[in-house]
Image (tube, rainbow, N blue to C red):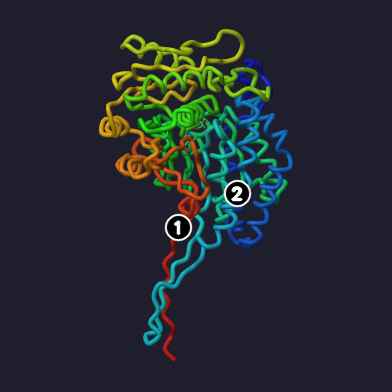
Amino acid sequence: MNVTNPATGKVIGEVPEDTPETIAAKLEGARAAQAGWAAVPLEERRARLRGFRNGLVGCKEDLARRLTAEVGKPIRQSWAELDAMPARIDFFLENVGRVMEEETVFRDAGKGLEERVAYEPLGVVANISAWNYPYFVGSNVFVPALLTGNAVLYKPSELASLTGQAIADLMRDAGVTAEVFTPVFGAGAVAAQLLTHPLDGVYFTGSHATGRKVAEAAGRGLMRMQLELGGKDPVYVCEDVDLDQAAPSVAVGAFYNTGQSCCAVERVYVHERIHDAFVEAFVNTVGAFVVGDPTDETAFIGPVTRPAQIEVLEAQVEDARRKGAQVPLGGRRREGPGSWFEPTVVTHVDHRMELMREESFGPVIGIQKVKGDDEALSLMNDTRYGLTAGVYSRDRERARRILSSVRSGSVYWNCCDRVSPRLPWSGRGHSGIGATLGLDGIRAFLQPKAWHLRAPRA
Ligand code: TXE
């Protein structure tokens, strides 16, 4: 399987693609190894995952360059992803013990009866992952899965295979064997083949369309399933904000990682009283973002990682134009090698337009004028997705009122495009099922066992 640099269109590497036979053999190896791994004392499992964490820190520069080469992420943003990894892994290391702790929930000394709950790993789980933040979205699954005693078959995105390979190598160096953490390489067909096997769980990060296929496969095999899917995340900017703070904050939330974040701002609603001034400040901010060679430290916007997405962006902008929208900035693909799309701001939009309904997942954003909070809330909820939503206002109570009525897994006041290892990450509706991160994101890899214990009569 070739690996292509999206900034140049050049092939930069090769990865051996798995076949039905190698997948079956890997699964068998994982099955054989899992019980032994679960029997390793938690302290030792923790030590090995700490070794993985330290390995990431030790070769940060190489890993960042590799990530930038294969997905086109601007180098500063590759560094930032790697810099955030230790704290993320530490959260799991520090909290796995208390989540796994057995508890006595009932005791009757007179009858010699005790009831206890214990938590066991699921067994062998598949982690099918996305390319946009391969370290984040991968480790959200495989770190807690391994810590809790599961074996993992890790299928990185075909667009981030070199990074997947590097992650697998670091695991091995840290003493997590190739059977306990097994990479599986390939595209959709390989992932689909993997899911024909009897697994104990599938943890998927990716698009809604693929998530549905994974759900069907998980249903057929009756296996535990978790889906972290896309979004159409809204932000509402109230009339009381400081534009110099709000406009750049929302612009970065929309265009960071070239707009290819699951929680990127995808729709902006602005109170009519400040709409024009906000658009001006927003366009000025976005117009100043440096677009270019992602290995250059000044670059803020890089190529679109998946070439086919360029057509989606073009079609959304074209559909919006046809229905009356204006495009004060960008709007076109950039010719030349690689896959590039101009940072694009679209105004005078409404919900008849694809741009305001379907995930763009690229450097394109629509801004819509609203009359007030009620209209903003009803538009924010006019979607089948529900990953994140934000309100910018000086008034915390007003933001709380709006955000508590928004259907989404995470809500933000005066911030956006933010993830914390301490908080559960989940989606409503088409944005997914289950939660990663937080304590829920550790429990997700465990199953309870109920112990009914009766002491023999003396
Ligand atoms: O997804 P794809 P991508 C979302 C983000 C966007 C998408 C981008 O919002 O929608 O992910 O990631 C494999 N059976 N999130 O383009 O194409 C494929 O090989 C089984 C949400 O990678 O769906 C890859 O490994 N698997 C998020 C994986 O599915 C199949 C965080 C994803 O591919 C398959 C980050 C099949 N039939 C991104 N076909 C969150 N909510 O946390 C393909 N695959």
| Residue 137, image x, y percentages | 54, 39
**Secondary structure beneath label 2:** helix
The residue under label 2 is 89
| Residue 288, image x, y percentages | 56, 19
Q: Residues within 10 Å of mark 2 (few under 14, many from 20)?
A: many
293 in relation to 164, above or below: above
Q: Is there any visible trace of residue 234 in the rendered image?
A: no
| Residue 130, image x, y percentages | 52, 33
Q: Residues within 10 Å of mark 1 (few under 14, many from 20)?
A: some
Q: Quadrant of residue 184?
A: top right
Could you say which is closer to the camera, residue 428 or residue 256? 256
The residue under label 1 is 447
| Residue 368, image x, y percentages | 34, 22
Q: Is residue 183 left or right of residue 442?
A: right
Hey, what amino acid is under mark 1? Gln
Hey, what amino acid is under mark 2? Ile
48 in relation to 456, above or below: above
